[in-house]
Amino acid sequence: MRGCLNALKTLARALALYLRSSGQKTLSISSLTGQESIKIAFRALARFHDSSFGYPLFSEAMVTLLLEGTSWLEKINWRVILTGDEAYLVVPLDFVKEFLNAEEEVILKYMLNSGACREKM
């Protein structure tokens, strides 16, 4: 059941739930400070993790995605960064605005359209 598509579904679900829970607050704060992007800690996304796609840990799904390739991330101006022992997904504030109340299927389609799960490094 593991694989790139299930890892992507894991991320889409966690992002959708995170944005519904914390997106408006994040958007308000970031807009006030003039930020163009936000950092979302993997551990924050892990709170919304659903293991039904075959990944017991959110971080395992992210490793699968990163091993598949990262050009799709660059295409949509997303990055994964490490600061100390913390991993973050950096996304543009415009993404948060556009997908604030989006269903996971909409976010999944957005990532697939960017080229996610189409390359192998």
Image (spheres, helix red, strand yellow):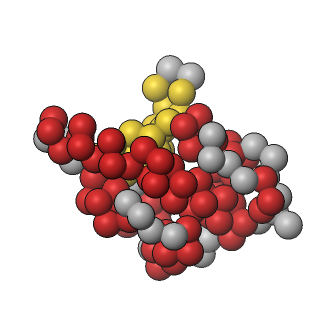
Depth check: give the residue in front, 46 or 69: 46
Place residue 77 in its image quadrant: bottom left
Residue appearing at x 63%, y 41% in the figure: 46
Q: Does residue 47 lie above or below 16 as drawn?
A: above
On-image quarter of the N terminus: bottom right
On-image quarter of the C terminus: bottom right
Most extreme residue toward the right is 1
Depth check: give the residue in front, 43 or 115: 43
Horizontal relation, residue 71 to residue 12: left or right = left
Q: Does residue 42 lie above or below 94 as drawn?
A: above
Numbered marks: total: 0
Place residue 28 in its image quadrant: top left
Residue 91 % position (x, y)? 37, 51
Residue appearing at x 65%, y 65% in the figure: 9
Horizontal relation, residue 87 to residue 101: left or right = right
Residue 33 % position (x, y)? 15, 35
Residue 21 % position (x, y)? 47, 48
Most extreme residue toward the top is 84
Q: Does residue 88 lie above or below 84 as drawn?
A: below
Residue 61 % position (x, y)? 69, 52
Q: Is residue 92 visible?
A: no
Horizontal relation, residue 115 to residue 25: left or right = right
Residue appearing at x 38%, y 49% in the figure: 23
Residue appearing at x 28%, y 47% in the figure: 27
Q: Is residue 56 visible?
A: yes
Place residue 30 in its image quadrant: top left
Depth check: give the residue in front, 6 or 84: 6
